[in-house]
Image (spheres, grey):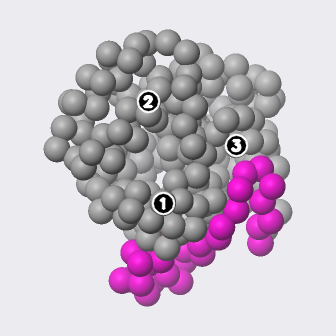
Amino acid sequence: MDRVLEPELMDDALQARAYAQADFSEPHNAYPQLFLTEFKSPPGQAVVLDLGCGPGDVTVRFAKTFPEYEFHAVDGAAAMLNQARIALDEDSDLARRIRLMEGILPELTLPRSSYDVILSSNLLHHLADPQALWRTVRRFGRSGTLVFVTDLFRPESRALAAGLVERYARDEPEILRRDFFNSLLAAFTPEEIRTQLAVANLQCLTVKVTSDRHVIVAGTLH
C-alpha cells in the first residue's frame, strides 16, 4: 500500500482538545519504560529536546519518570501547545522543568545548540519530508546524544488499517478514529525508515517493531 499524506500540523482547537482528552495511557506509559530498556544507564541529569510534543502527554510522562531532567518541548501547532499549557498549569514542578516552544522542523531556533537526549513521539508520519526530522536530530545532537523516536508504521493494506482502528479505537470519538486511520496510511514502513536513516548517515540508530502498529528508532549518536 502506498503512503497517503496527511496534514503536517494539527492546529484545529477541537482536534487538539480531543487528543488532550483521549486516553493514550497504554502506549504512552510504555515509552519511558522502553527508553529505560533501550538505554540501561541513562544520564542522571539531562536536557531533553522533545520534537512534536503535541498536547504534552508523552513529555509529562517522561518528566515524571525522570525528575532530574529538563525538557524543551517543540510543536508546530499553537492549538496543541495551548493544551500542553493547560496540563502544565496543574503541576508547578512540571511547569518549571518543561519549556514549551512553537516551531516548524527543520528550521528551528532553540535555546541550546545540542541536547543530551532527543525524543520524538508520533511526529514522523506527519512529515511530507521525513528528512526534516533526521536533519533536526543531526543538527541538535552531538556525540553521545541519546535518540528515542516512536511512531506508527504503515500496514500492508487499508483493510488492515481499518482493523487496527476497530481494535484499538472502537470507543473513541470519530475525530480520533478518523485521524488514527489516516495516520496509519501516512506512516512509514520499518524498511522505509531504515532507508531514511541511511540517507541521513544515522546508521547508529536501529529500527525495532514493538507491536502490531508501533515502531521505535533508538540509539546513541556517534
Q: Earlier in the sequence, mark 3 or mark 1?
A: 1
Q: Where residue 114 appears, x then y in whole percent?
A: 78, 59
Residue 127, how many percent across, how many down?
A: 64, 39
Q: Is residue 22 visible?
A: yes
Task: List x then y, in percent, for residue 193.
Answer: 62, 25
Is residue 151 left or right of 133 when viewed as pictured?
left
**Crowd class of label 3 (few under 14; some 14 to 19; many from 20; radius 10 Å):** many
Residue occupied by mark 1: 12
Q: Which residue is mark 3?
A: 133
Secondary structure type for disc 2: helix
Q: Nearer the viewer, mark 2 or mark 3?
A: 2
Q: CA distance from mark 3 to mark 1?
A: 22 Å
Lower position in the chain sequence, tag 2 or tag 1: 1
Say whether residue 99 is left or right of residue 31. Answer: right
User: Please, is residue 32 above or below residue 217 in the view?
Assistant: below
View extreme (bottom): residue: 92
Q: Amino acid at mark 1?
A: Asp
Residue under the point 58% across and 52% down: 9
What amino acid is at disc 3? Leu
Distance, label 2 to label 1, CA atoms, is 20 Å
**Residue 20 seen in the figure:** no
Query: Which SS class for mark 3?
Result: helix
Q: Which residue is mark 2?
A: 184
Judging depth in this view, the residue of 95 and 67 nearest the camera is 95
Which region is colored magenta? 84-111
